[in-house]
Image (cartoon, rainbow, N blue to C red):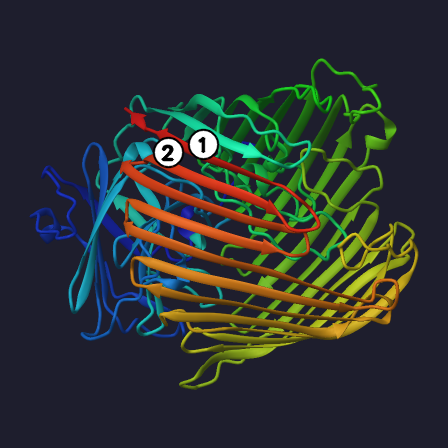
Amino acid sequence: MLFFSHANAQKKNAAYTLDITRTNETMTIDGIGDEATWQTVEAAKDFFMVLPMDDRKATQPSEVKMTYDDKHLYLLATFFKTPGNTYVVESLRRDFSFGANDNFLLFMDPFNNQTTGFSFGANAYGAQWDGTMYNGGSVDLNWDSKWVSEVQNYDDKWVVEMAIPFKSIRYEKGVKEWGINFSRLDLSTNEKSSWTPIPRQFPTASLAYTGKLVWDDAPPKQGLNYSLIPYVLGTVGNSSIPGKNYDDQFKVGGDVKLGLSSSLNLDLTINPDFSQVEVDRQVANLDRFELFFPERRQFFLENADLFASFGYDNIRPFFSRRIGLGVPIIAGARVSGNLNRNLRLGLMDMQTEKVDETGLPSQNFAVLSLQQKVFSRSSIGLMMVNKESFDYDGLADSLQTRYTKYNRNLGLEYNLASRDNAYTGKLFMLKSFGPEDSYDGFSQGAHLAYSSRKWNWRIQEQYVSRDFVSEVGYVPRNNYISFNGSLGYLFLPESEIVVSHGPKFFGQYYFDPDFHSTDYVSVLGYEVNFLNRSSLEVNYFNEFVELLTPFDPTNTNKPELATGTRHYWNGFNWEYNSRPKSLFTYTFYGRLGRYYEGGSRTNVSSQIGYRIQPYASLAATASYNKIDLPSPWNTTEFWLAGAEADITFTNKLFWSTLFQYNEQSKNFNLNSRFQWRYAPASDIFLVYTNNERIAPLEGNIWSLTLKMTYWFNK
């Protein structure tokens, strides 16, 4: 290869090894672990404490054992606890919230590249967790795989047993050493622990600190590996909103997964449907630019970091939500995974239908992403994005929107990650292309960050030209140069109440290309983290905005402030989060300060939750905004409120309902979803959605969908 990597011997925790040997015994996954194999294999134990302090061994003993056969990787983990300490479990929902459950997580780095991998886990009542790992320590829980596990509870311990099919994961053929680590969270003692020692400022998912899983023989070849996931659905509904019709429908489609190798996968989708995906959470919008909502559709999520992590959060050349929202997708294909230990590939192609009512032509979206590992944990990435319109009519009639013939982005980036994860950074450049000169722009960004037990800092700059266009990306703002930075320090007192506390500063400053200041925000704050995992944060902020376009400061269709007007304000905000192990939890947020035109803005928000362990998690949120401005705006008040019930009858039968009331956007939304996982990775969904307009708007739109999927695999 053109690039090189340091030897694995330089890995931080390479001395921590766990031998795994083959079993010839038939393993029963029941959470009991009474097979003879479990009495003879090596155990990973003597865990290290990570939180609240990383300078000692864990007080709650843990023990993990592993074995394998031709088809499965097996794990048996035992977590001892002080008798009488209660288990803390939020619900039986898959991919549970890490900080709200007693849980165990397995982190695997099959390529030993300290960058990518897989995570599997369970909470103390048996809810499963699985996700893909990227960026050296992040877990994407939107990925689901087909595997089994069982949990048993006792007064002095809980036990989890797993069987993970080799076909469910990707790994390099013939390699006999994997990176591996085990993490435990025990909320009865507020203790997070890890098999290998990890500094407290890093997550236990950090692949820079994994130990080694040493195989007695190379893991078995996967052979032919494919899955068929068809679906069938029927939907009925109605709309009384003028100009919005709703037609009943019957649809058939599905996905195909094909293992091109043990580390590279092909995904195909035909006539996909995403009706069972959770709805977006509404927010009070007082921003001048487009808001970002995350992708939730399953097809786009495996190895999503290859496509979505290029650039920055506000300079993304590819944002999958640009594809197929409000426009039918005909079909799509994606190849993703590892070509070898150091080189990753992501290739995607999606085709959408045309929409005659708006003049939108049929469009093709193609993306190529390459990521080459260099040095110990860093990488170089290349991305190409192409959006092409077919049967294109650039002069659509006056009642239709004008769409571009094509838009392309080409980018190159370097991602820095030091061997011990203390230093991270990025440098990227992007060029856009289009049918006119106004589409041929440029963007770039760079940052460097440092994190230690007590200190953390980050410096960053970015630039987007006026004519940089990314129609398949998320770039809400153009024609600026920006600098931002942060600095924080933590005191670690010897205290039975406070774990850490300290000051922090954040500043972001925008300029036009002539270095004329257009807006900035400076924030000076103090945070306190308590031993019971509750936290308090208080901030003072100072802001300036010179409007680049007209803007209504209430976002409620009132008069707009003129372009070029300059506005200064300051204020305070605070946030308190209660301890997660309580059955009753709560968060309070408040903001007091000035606002545009010498006015003021008050915001008070709260979220309260209650769990009926482990079957129900109930939550309610409320946010109140009051904006006082001179005439013609005067006083504007609006509420955003919501309530959510997440009922988990078993770890295979779920019912969730979400109510949202948004007085600012004049909308009331109800989404209720019933899910039965009647077979591994196979589901029946019944989903009801109702959007009601609030006066003076009129009308509503509702739908009821029944959908069935089944996962066939070999």
Secondary structure beneath label 2: loop
| 349 relative position to 254: left or right | right
**Percent position (x, y) of residue 326?**
61, 31
Choose between 526 and 463: the one closer to the eye: 526
Q: Pointer 2: what residue?
A: 172
State the separation of the CA atoms marked 2 and 1: 7 Å
Compared with 450, 428 (above or below) is above
**Percent position (x, y) of residue 459?**
69, 60
**Percent position (x, y) of residue 546?**
87, 59
* Local crowd size for mark 2, using a 10 Å CA cut-off: few (<14), some (14–19), many (≥20): many
Residue drawn at point x = 45 percent, y = 32 percent: 340
Compared with 410, 457 (above or below) is below
Choose between 128 and 417: the one closer to the eye: 128
Choose between 698 and 250: the one closer to the eye: 698
Choose between 200 and 695: the one closer to the eye: 695
Whether residue 553 is visible here, answered yes or no, is yes
Q: Pointer 1: what residue?
A: 340
What amino acid is at disc 2? Answer: Glu
Report the number of numbered marks: 2
| 229 relative position to 39: left or right | right
What amino acid is at disc 1? Answer: Asn
Whether residue 3 is visible here, answered yes or no, is no
Mark 2 vs 1: CB contact within 8 A: yes
Q: Quadrant of residue 23?
A: top left
**Percent position (x, y) of residue 14?**
36, 54
Instruction: Name the outermost residue toward the bottom.
Output: 495
| 574 relative position to 563: left or right | left
Secondary structure beneath label 1: loop
